[in-house]
Image (spheres, grey):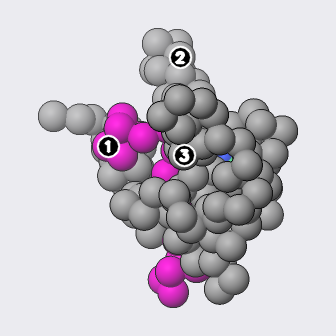
Amino acid sequence: MPNAQEQDVLSGSITAFIIPAEQVACVQPENSLEHALLVLVKSGYTAIPVLGMDNKLNGLISKAQILDSILGIERMEPEKLATWLVSDIMNNDHVSIHKSASFERLMTLLIQYPFVCVEDENGIFEGIIPRSKVLAHLNGFLHDLRRQ
Ligand code: AMP
């Protein structure tokens, strides 16, 4: 049985972990793959959200997906970078959570995914929570427990 303090952490709010939308590197479905690759390489992230004009999450796109899409049978086909769009290859089966979700639910998702997208009640993208933010918090929590 978790004690009261542990219970509090598990059922607590996740909003403090959110990196707000304006600080998240993202692209739009109608951007070219070339643009998406530039954003991914310059930001240093493996995958980033794809947001529609309505600020709703459409999917995710990764460096691996882009590289895979320009891999021809006998050679690389970099010319596709300028003509193919993010919407042609993005991953639609993304996972997102509501900002009122519990910390427990967030942790369950972060075991599987390196980051989770957060939406408000209207499905508007609020930001992301990367695994590293939650691990840093848990690390602090465990150290506090040991000190007590
Ligand atoms: P981290 O746990 O900090 O390594 O982040 C895990 C993943 O979350 C990264 O590889 C990115 O895919 C994503 N990520 C983290 N921070 C951002 C950000 N500011 N903008 C876009 N994606 C991010």
Q: Single out the residue that lies furthest toward the front.
A: 74
User: Is 42 left or right of 83, judged from the image as shown?
Assistant: right
User: Could you say whether the residue bearing mark 2 is in a helix, strand or loop?
Assistant: helix
Q: Residues within 10 Å of mark 3 (few under 14, many from 20)?
A: some
Q: Residues within 10 Å of mark 2 (few under 14, many from 20)?
A: few
Q: Is residue 136 above or below residue 38?
A: above
User: Could you say whether the residue bearing mark 1 is in a helix, strand or loop?
Assistant: helix
Q: In this view, does 125 lie above or below 11?
A: below
User: Is 111 left or right of 24, judged from the image as shown?
Assistant: left
Q: Is residue 83 visible?
A: yes
Whether ligand 1 has any atom under 8 Å from the Cβ at mark 1 is answered as no
Which callout, 3 or 2, points to the residue nearer the camera?
3
Q: Residue 2 in magenta?
A: no
Give the numbered dot on residue 132: none
Q: What residue type is labelled 2?
A: His
Name the one closer to the observer, 3 or 21: 21
| Magenta part of the chain | 108-124
Image point (68%, 73%), residue name: 30
Q: Which amino acid does label 1 sit on?
A: Thr
Q: Mark 1 points at which residue?
A: 108
The CA span between labels 3 and 2 is: 45 Å
Q: Mark 3 points at which residue?
A: 69
- Percent of width and height locating residue 85: 64, 64
Asked if marks 1 and 2 touch (Cβ < 8 Å), the reply is no
Which callout, 3 or 1, points to the residue nearer the camera?
3
Q: Which amino acid does label 3 sit on?
A: Ser
Q: Mark 2 points at which residue?
A: 143
